[in-house]
Image (tube, grey):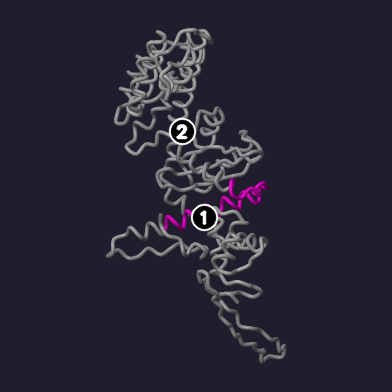
Amino acid sequence: MTRDLGFRERVWIKSVLGIYRAQCLCSVTFQAEDPEAPPRWKFSRQVRECVVNGIVRDRMSVQRLLERMKEDFFLEISEGFVFECLAWADEEFDLKAHFESVAGRFSGTLCIDELYDGDIKVVFATDPVRNETVGFRVVKSTSRAEVEPFLVELRERGIAPTVVITDDSPLYPEMLQAVWTGVEHQTCVFHFLQGAGKAVLKAVRQVAKTFPAKSTEKSLRPVKGSKDPKRVTTRAFISKNRFLIVKKQENLSAKELEILPELLACHPDLPRLRRFTESLHGLFEPDISQRTARLRRSWLVAGNLVAAFPSFKAVYQRLEDESFNKLIGYMRRDDGERTSNHVERLNRGFRLIQKTRYRHRTTATVERAIRLDISYRARRAAKAECTIMAPETPRMPLPDGPSWHSNLQPE
């Protein structure tokens, strides 16, 4: 039986177990168990931990993991054994107890978002203040009939948020009030700015199309490595540098700062679009009050661009009172979250899992992958919390759960 792992060396232990016979009339025989290797285990718990960590922590594919175990530890394991280890780790983790613990320290801020990966649809709920996953559910469709039962389940588990942050999906406003009456619904500032930026870029492309596609005039911008100027039309110049209109001033490079005035001089509408972008970012500057944000909003709405650029219609609708109040709700709280990026990062983590484990295509395998990821992050957070504690403070015991995280190090 392989008990310990030695890097590029073979480590074996011979275990001799006694066989006993009962003294009663049944005369049944039984064998003492080795805690490191229950009956019918070919490899010890430590080997299984290494296999699970390779998949869950290191995001390795099964084939790469098999090669690693063979090259580094001289262990030839099968693909079936890898999935057996994943199932074992999943059984070791008590997800219900973990979520009960999460509900007990819930901060009151809840982020909700849907994830789409082909035919797979998952609804995630996270606590951005505590940096924890509150719950998840694989659904057939992102309709109210499918999502509302998930929110009801969160409520029954003791999740009572004071504010819920979502994107601007029309799915949530009525549904949130039906599940948590009176809860504050805040929409994500990032998603709003992203949509507004797309509207500005669409307007810039509209301006560029007012210029002819071909021109005989020569630009004063020479080709790199050539003494002859390159023929560049105004239309092509605007199209190539259109992103400068939406880029923040502090993020512009020295070269971009030189190009920007030349770009704005190409058409009278471009400076208007640039001022709109700068004013839009000013609505959500740090440390400003809701009153200041509303005053800036009034000035921004006064310069209506919808008449010239229809793409701004949706942006101005979001700047109306009711919708705008949902965007600036975070300004009333000292620790207010203004985006739903926390749950978005969780979505990206799941996509990374799918990238290395392309076989997660059924509800059962998707749910297991998410449970294992939650288990890994929970144990990592517990280890990090123990590490940063003061020496005189008693060590916080790790929560009951699987032992396959035992060799994790805090990041």
Q: Is residue 312 visible?
A: no
* Label 1: which secondary element: loop
Extreme residue in the left direction: 392
Q: What crowding class fits label 2: few (fewer than 14 Cα within 10 Å), some (14-19), or many (20 or more)?
A: few
**Residue 322 location (% of width, % of height):** 44, 22
Q: Residue 182 carries which label?
A: 2
Q: In which quarter of the image is the C terminus?
A: bottom left
Residue 376: say if magenta: yes
Question: Type of residue at label 1?
Answer: Asp
Q: In this view, does 113 lie above or below 59?
A: above
Q: Is residue 15 above or below residue 201?
A: below
**Residue 399 location (% of width, % of height):** 46, 62
> Image quarter for residue 143?
top right
Q: Main secondary structure of the magenta part?
A: helix
**Residue 217 location (% of width, % of height):** 46, 8
Residue 362: say if magenta: yes
Question: Type of residue at label 2?
Answer: Gly
Q: Can residue 240 be seen in this view?
A: yes
- Point out the frontmost of discs 2 and 1: 1
* Label 2: which secondary element: loop
The stretch in magenta equals: 354-382
Pick the front one: 16 or 331? 16
